[in-house]
Amino acid sequence: MTPSTPHKHYEYRVLTIDRGTSVPQARRLLTDEAEYGRWELARTRLYQGGHRKVWLRRAIIKVSSTL
């Protein structure tokens, strides 16, 4: 990383998707989160029972005062 590149800080959100959820329903849920909440996919994990955990992240934007 170069000195001019700022460190990005993220906030995370974890969603659990039941095994009964269809692929189109899960895709729609994640698409809505990405479009309207500005979340991006960070990680997915499939568990033995069939449910999934999905980690979403978004950058924390810090605004500096101009006053």
Image: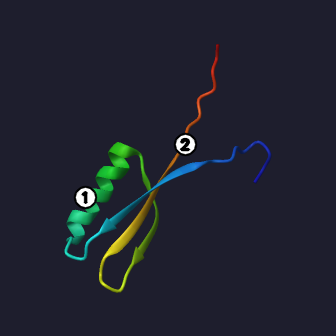
Q: Residue at x 29, y 68 (%)?
A: 17
Residue beneath disc 2 = 60
List x then y, in percent, for residue 19: 24, 77
Residue beneath disc 1 = 28
Q: Secondary structure at mark 1?
A: helix
Nearer to us of marks 2 and 1 is 2
Q: Is residue 27 left or right of residue 64?
A: left
Q: Residue at x 60, y 48 (%)?
A: 9
Query: Crowdedness of circle 1 by 10 Å Cα count: few (<14), some, many (20+)?
Result: few
Q: Quadrant of residue 41?
A: bottom left
List x then y, in percent, for residue 60: 54, 42
Q: Residue at x 33, y 43 (%)?
A: 36
Picture quarter with the C terminus: top right
List x then y, in percent, for residue 51: 31, 76
Q: Secondary structure at mark 2?
A: loop
Q: Residue furthest top?
A: 67
Q: Quadrant of residue 26?
A: bottom left
Of marks 2 and 1, which one's residue comes earlier in the chain?
1
Query: Crowdedness of circle 2 by 10 Å Cα count: few (<14), some, many (20+)?
Result: few
Residue type, numbered disc 1? Arg
